[in-house]
Amino acid sequence: MRIPFIKSISRNTEIEEVGQLLDTLPQSLISNQLWATFESNCETHFVIAHTGDTIALKFFVKEDVIKVNTHQTNGRVHKDNCVEFFVCFGEQNHYYNIELNCTGICLVGVGEGRLNRVLLEDKLIAKVKTYIKINTAPKNTSTKYMWEITAIIPIEVFEAHKLESFHQIKGAGNFFKCGDDLPQPHFYSWNKIESTKIDFHLPQFFGELAFD
């Protein structure tokens, strides 16, 4: 996946304006419904770009239930209506898992695998800006709700990599939609995961990312 550089916005741009700009870019579908016993009619798209020193990310979700029990940074947001972005840079094995519920509560961890992950400090995660819209879906549509979340992730959040710029760097990653405690638990990915166990923390199945 190519991640375009957008020079018309910066980390100081109002996040609503960032979200409107992302609306004009092509969307990618998180369509791999993993582990077929967890069927759902959820539908999720995303858009990603960068400004040199931030990543701009927006998810568009349609689903039947909104259920939120997590209100604390680094809480169990994957239990709620949740979207996730996993990413690593260069040849390093450490990757970040950035997880957001539909109210913007954020968890960010870093490590080489599922075990022994280190959660970032709250003050660093607080640098991630979010903007949320939750609406009831129009009549005669397949789901009851439509929600969107825009996130601006500054480069300093990726503290283990000491990045100076996103320009022209290579990486790998995956994008997910889940909701472990929803009436219809589900697990979707952008890049397909080949595993019999429910596990997003499998970097061997990350897709290639190329930043302009």
Image (cartoon, rainbow, N blue to C red):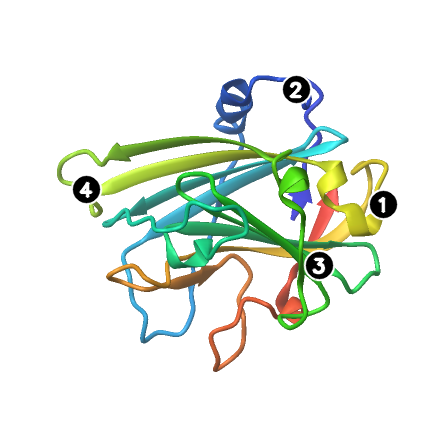
Residue type at mark 4 is: Thr
Q: Which of marks 3 and 4 is nearer the N terminus?
A: 3
Q: What element carries label 4?
A: loop
**Extreme-left residue of the structure:** 140
Q: Are marks 1 and 3 in contact (CB under 8 Å)?
A: no
- Could you tell me the amino acid type at mark 1? Lys
- C-alpha span from label 2 to label 4: 34 Å
Q: Mark 2 and mark 4 in contact? Answer it, CB < 8 Å.
A: no
Q: What residue type is labelled 3?
A: Tyr
Residue of label 3: 95
The mark found on residue 162 in the picture is 1
Percent coordinates x, y for residue 115 in the rendering: 64, 73
* Tag 2 secondary structure: loop
Q: Earlier in the sequence, mark 2 or mark 4?
A: 2
Task: Indicate which disc residue 14 carries.
Answer: none
The residue that label 4 is drawn on is: 141
Residue at 62% of width from left, 17% of height from top?
13
Few, some or many residues within 10 Å of mark 3 (<14, 14–19, 20+): many
Sequence-wise, which precedes: disc 2 or disc 3? 2
Image quarter for residue 144? top left
Q: Which residue is under mark 2? A: 9
Q: Quadrant of the C terminus?
A: top right
Residue that appears at 32% across and 64% down: 185
